[in-house]
Amino acid sequence: MWETYLVLSALLLILTILPKIPSPHWIFRFPDFGKIQITYFTIITFAVGFIIEKTEYFWYLQGLLLAMIIYHGITLIKYTPLYKVKKHPQTKNSSKKYHFISANVYQFNTDFEKFIQLINKNKPEIFLTMESNGDWEKALQVLEKDYPYQHKVTLENTYGMHFYSKIKIEESKTHYFVADDIPSIEAHLKTEDGFEFVFFGVHPPPPSPTEEETSKERDGDILSVAKRVTEIKKPVIVVGDFNNVAWSKSSILFRKTSHLIDPRVGHDFVSTFHAKYRLFRFPIDLMFHSEDIFIKDLKTLENFGSDHLPVYCEFFIDHHNDDQEERVEEADSEEKAEAEEMIEEGKEEDGERDAVVTED
């Protein structure tokens, strides 16, 4: 029992330290994804420590485990209701409430009807699909009567992306910020009551042993979006499968350089992947918004056969409410320079992806 406790303590310490090492290799970036699970296992190991036979090193190890619990807890508590943030009611100057669904559909998931039923049940004004290929585009044609405005990027490499809207799209474009096979969608929308906003859909590649060896393309892509956001003078929403967590260094840098707000703060983790394994589920489908976008609800919906749960959001726009200004963080000169460097590294990285991907 003592040996198991010792091994677990050492492993948890290693997983805590690895993300602090400034290397883009997936080995150092991946433990960030599991911070919630690492914290749970650290708490369990700490509790188990009190029922095993104590040695002269026992209290040192318990102190180390307690320090790790506090270290992780300081970060994670911000993404729970225990961290209080001000709620913002609608006023006469606000837009009406709008809704969107963001879903990584999993390219090889053929349960199209289940996703269509999800859309028909929740009736969002806009929705975004990721990993949507030609088969998904064909299946979703039945929704085009209700969603007359679309922007489609049909790819077979698991990075296809489709955007559907009941709200008028005045202008839209596809960006390929770091690679010619990794798209981002930028759509400028105008509501019937005259409110304008910009919707970004993103899906950068993950650092992992089976995909990209480093996080360079992922980080370069999302920071390129952040740079583009600062050029826009309208309210902005950025949504998608970031293949990243909100507390990682690159996510924090994204937030600071884009001047956008993370709605998970004071709310919930909103964990989405893997849809089938609740205990090993990471919050990697993220959302950020500008200060005049106000979030009323943010949650996951039921599984429709994908490996990701869909994200559902209810929001409104209010140009006359400055209450969220204090939540906007800005990057200093050193952080801006670091972001530029990461963008260039992302562009230089040569990701090896097939144009057509088949399921293993």
Image (cartoon, rainbow, N blue to C red):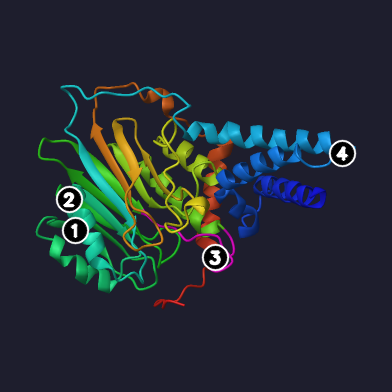
Q: Is residue 350 above or below residue 39?
A: below
Report whether 263 appears left or right of 214: left
Q: Earlier in the sequence, mark 4 or mark 2?
A: 4
Q: Is residue 239 above or below residue 359?
A: above
Q: Is residue 229 magenta?
A: no
Image marks 4 and 3: residues in contact by CB distance under 8 Å = no
Front in this rendered view, residue 72 or 155: 72
Say which residue appears at 59% left-offset and 34% top-offset. Answer: 73
Say which residue appears at 34% left-offset and 35% top-offset. Answer: 290
Tell me the kind of residue under disc 4.
Answer: Tyr
Kindly identify which residue carries mark 3: 212
Label number found at residue 150: 1
Report the Cα–Cα distance between label 2 and label 1.
Answer: 8 Å
Kindly identify which residue carries mark 4: 57
Q: Earlier in the sequence, mark 4 or mark 3?
A: 4
Report the Cα–Cα distance between label 3 and label 2.
Answer: 34 Å
Most distant residue in the right direction? 56
Please provide the residue range marked out in magenta.
202-214
Front in this rendered view, residue 59 or 227: 59
Tell me the kind of residue under disc 3.
Answer: Glu
Image marks 4 and 1: residues in contact by CB distance under 8 Å = no
Label number found at residue 315: none
Report the Cα–Cα distance between label 4 and label 2.
Answer: 64 Å
Image marks 3 and 2: residues in contact by CB distance under 8 Å = no
| Mark toward the viewer: 3 or 2 | 3
Front in this rendered view, residue 149 or 271: 271
Report the Cα–Cα distance between label 3 and label 1.
Answer: 30 Å
Image marks 2 and 1: residues in contact by CB distance under 8 Å = yes
Q: Earlier in the sequence, mark 3 or mark 2?
A: 2
